[in-house]
């Protein structure tokens, strides 16, 4: 099998998932421009931290200006900071591993206010393209949650053969919705009583 374990982009990120908790997955990610990990306590926080990293590089460049309610012009967010210098070699970067799963994320475009790129499930040496943040998260959650049948999502041929099987009781997208909203005091967020993710 062709080795999929490589960085391959100036903004390549190694996502190390160390465990799962009531707020979702916990772990950290690494990139070439600092030695210290960037920790996160859920998929939502991970996405925000990665977006901040891409903004700091101004790569990939946003195709849309960021909208906001302040008077500051949105395009200021695109101004490039001082050129960053890599301080971690690719092999050292690839040496980081999560206690549960490891992913290599290469965001190639930020079009239509979302991401497009490639994600590698390092523990299985499998790579797939994603067309949005949601699709990337869906792939990660299929790998992280056993009841979501990760092999089906990461093996499209098998997924087509198994498409007549009953869907899992809790769809992976609900996990992300819970994780994304959980850091915020939003008391109106509820799920049905038979949804296991809040039990």
Image (spheres, rainbow, N blue to C red):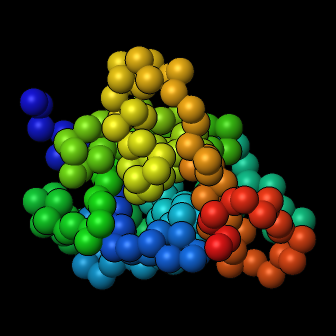
Q: x, y (%) of residue 137?
A: 52, 50
Q: Residue at x 34, y 29 (%)?
A: 155
Tally of numbered tags = 0
The residue depicted at 33 percent of the width and 78 percent of the height is: 37
Residue 98 position in % (x across, y down): 27, 68
Closest to the observer, 15 or 116: 15
Question: Relative to 98, is 195 above or below?
Answer: above
Nearest the camera: 109 or 164? 164
Residue under the image location 53 percent in, 21 percent down: 164
- Quarter location, residue 144: bottom left
Q: Position of residue 46 (x, y in %)?
A: 51, 67
Q: Which residue occupies 20% across, 68% down?
A: 96
Determine which quarter of the picture holds residue 97: bottom left
Q: Nearer the viewer, residue 76 or 35?
A: 35
Q: Is residue 196 above or below residue 159?
A: below
- From the top left corner, tell me how far across and down residue 77 is, in percent: 65, 62
Q: Quadrant of the N terminus?
A: top left
């Amino acid at each position: 099998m062709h080795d999929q374990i490589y960085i391959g982009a100036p903004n390549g990120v190694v996502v190390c998932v160390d465990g799962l908790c009531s707020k979702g997955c916990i772990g950290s990610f690494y990139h070439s421009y600092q030695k210290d990990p960037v920790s996160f306590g859920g998929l939502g926080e991970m996405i925000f931290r990665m977006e901040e990293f891409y903004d700091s590089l101004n790569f990939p460049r946003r195709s849309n200006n960021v909208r906001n309610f302040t008077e500051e012009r949105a395009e200021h967010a695109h101004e490039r900071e001082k050129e960053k210098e890599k301080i971690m070699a690719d092999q050292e970067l690839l040496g980081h591993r999560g206690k549960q799963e490891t992913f290599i994320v290469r965001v190639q475009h930020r079009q239509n206010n979302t991401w497009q790129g490639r994600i590698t499930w390092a523990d299985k040496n499998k790579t797939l393209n994603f067309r949005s943040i949601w699709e990337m998260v869906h792939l990660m959650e299929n790998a992280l949650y056993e009841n979501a049948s990760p092999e089906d999502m990461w093996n499209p041929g098998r997924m087509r053969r198994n498409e007549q099987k009953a869907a899992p009781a809790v769809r992976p997208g609900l996990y992300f919705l819970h994780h994304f909203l959980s850091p915020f005091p939003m008391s109106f967020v509820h799920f049905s009583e038979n949804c296991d993710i809040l039990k």
